[in-house]
Image (tube, rainbow, N blue to C red):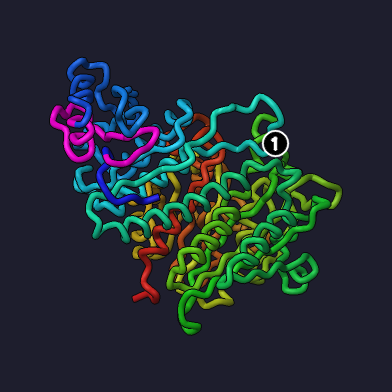
Amino acid sequence: MVRAGKVVAIEADAWVALVYEGENKLSGAAAAIDRATGGMIRERLAAGDFKGKLREICVLYPRAGFKCRCILIAGLGKKTEFRTETVRAASAATAQKARALELKTLVFPADSGTAGLAVPELAEAVVEGAALGLYRFEAYRTQDMEESASPAQVILAVENGRSRPAVERAVERAQIVSGAVRLVRDLVSTPPGDMTPAALARVATDLASNRRALSVEVLEADRMREIGMNALLGVGCGSHEAPKFIILTYHGAAADVPPIVLVGKGVTFDSGGLSLKSYENMEGMKDDMAGGAVVLATMAAAADLSLPLNLVGLVPAAENLPGGGAYKPGDVLKSLSGRTIEVMNTDAEGRLLLADALNYAERYEPQAVIDVATLTGACVVALGPELIGLFGNDDALKARLRAAGDATGEAVWELPLWRDYDELIKSDIADFKNTGGREGGAITAALFLSKFVGPHPWAHLDIAGPVWAKKDRPIIPKGASGVGVRLLVRMLRDWPTAMP
């Protein structure tokens, strides 16, 4: 909600003051709140019991007669280290504290006193931070649920009335994108017995049914077999759950504008197949469909935002299980492209179904193709739990993704498509092997995908590291992160209608 006026003029459970670490001089709404309360904020700073460190929260209770029950001072950290992500983190911490205090309304300042950040950008970051920081997955809880509810309302106080329309648009945008991220978190958190390929296809159908510009088609196994998607079918043949190939189409530009194609890995559970994973690593493999979930949510967000683009979302969905009909190490699969693949390890399955999906993308003569996948443990080893691995064949496309990562805090780090490693995925009996071994595994996996990509710009995002947070992070509570949605939506927002 957006309200015109100063923070101190709005009645609410709590006013929020944003304060830098080590800064004795207050500015903006923090200075106004301090004046209105007779210097309460400066007193806490002088006493040294609040330092303004990032995500540090101090609660003040003013005397009776004020339009707020309490004041939440939120630390922004050092001014020299300020980024937009700082606001998201501070907003998340403030909202979490408000939930603990059972506060129902919070008033955040939306003014330019925060490191010169544009007011709409500040407002968008505040809403994103609060919405994502308060996320919980409780669909399967029946007892021991926490009683405290989320704040009912976050109010943005806009002092300059002329900026109000832009702030309202920013808030709406943040709500749409945050909703898409929360959808991904829900889907990835859902137990694999419930989140099957068919269930993922139903999610896509529901998303399209509620959006006029979005349409869906689901290819069944018979159709995939007819057109030659044998790599995808191979991955799914050990399961009683039939694979699905989900196609979402969004029309936001003229019909003659080539689309951008997004491809998401949709392995709804990965046991490793006959190359069985160890039990320690299998429990979390419900998250192997996160790339597919990101594509579905991004397509829905694009439609809700009415982006002036044409988009196609492709999600090859399957379970990788060691049933009696499962594909075997040593098998050779003929992919949709006609190229043959020797299966060295059935736990290198994601690249197989992506190979068919990437080749299918050629039918759209796209501007660009971007695939998103929890593809390799090797990428986690190389980059750790927070960075997205980036590969690609086009510098301009990679630059767009890096810029979007900087803006959203979903950071990408480029790794090389080192062509000398092509030798590692050459097969003695087929065109390619589906794995080049452990060394350089993220690179050889990306090289394998590149063999099924056409002449258009292409990028591969390996989200295996940040897909699941093992501990609480500023705007990502422990669990499914939803990483990739904000990155892709921001890139698409900044994309011109047609490539130059």
389 with respect to 277 (left or right) = left
Residue 265 drawn above or below residue 70: below
Question: Which residue does the image show at 49% across and 47% down from the upper left?
Answer: 483
112 with respect to 370 (left or right) = left
Name of the residue lying farthest toward the left: 25
Based on the picture, tell me whether residue 108 belongs to the magenta stretch: no
On the image, the x and y values in percent for residue 88 come to: 37, 41
Q: Viewer-proximal residue, 206 or 434? A: 206
On the image, the x and y values in percent for residue 292 come to: 60, 55
Q: Estimate how packed mark 1 is, as few (under 14), some (14 to 19) or many (20 or more) residues with alpha carbons within 10 Å.
A: few
What secondary structure is marked by label 1? loop
Q: Viewer-proximal residue, 451 or 170? A: 170
Residue 384 seen in the current view: no
Name of the residue lying farthest toward the front: 65
Question: Which residue does the image show at 42% across and 56% down from the upper left?
Answer: 172
- The magenta span reads 9-35
Residue 62 drawn above or below residue 416: above
43 with respect to 397 (left or right) = left
Where, by quadrant of the figure, is residue 342 drawn?
bottom right
The amino acid type found where label 1 is placed reads Tyr
On the image, the x and y values in percent for residue 68 come to: 34, 32
User: Can you say which quadrant of the picture contains the C terminus?
Assistant: bottom left
Based on the picture, tell me whether residue 24 belongs to the magenta stretch: yes
Question: Which residue does the image show at 52% across and 59% down from the upper left?
Answer: 298
* Numbered circles on residues, count: 1
Name of the residue lying farthest toward the right: 324
On the image, the x and y values in percent for residue 129 come to: 41, 42
Residue 237 drawn above or below residue 376: below
Question: Which residue does the image show at 46% across and 60% down from the upper left?
Answer: 459
Q: Viewer-proximal residue, 113 or 10? A: 10
Please name the residue that numbered disc 1 is placed on.
140
Residue 62 seen in the current view: yes
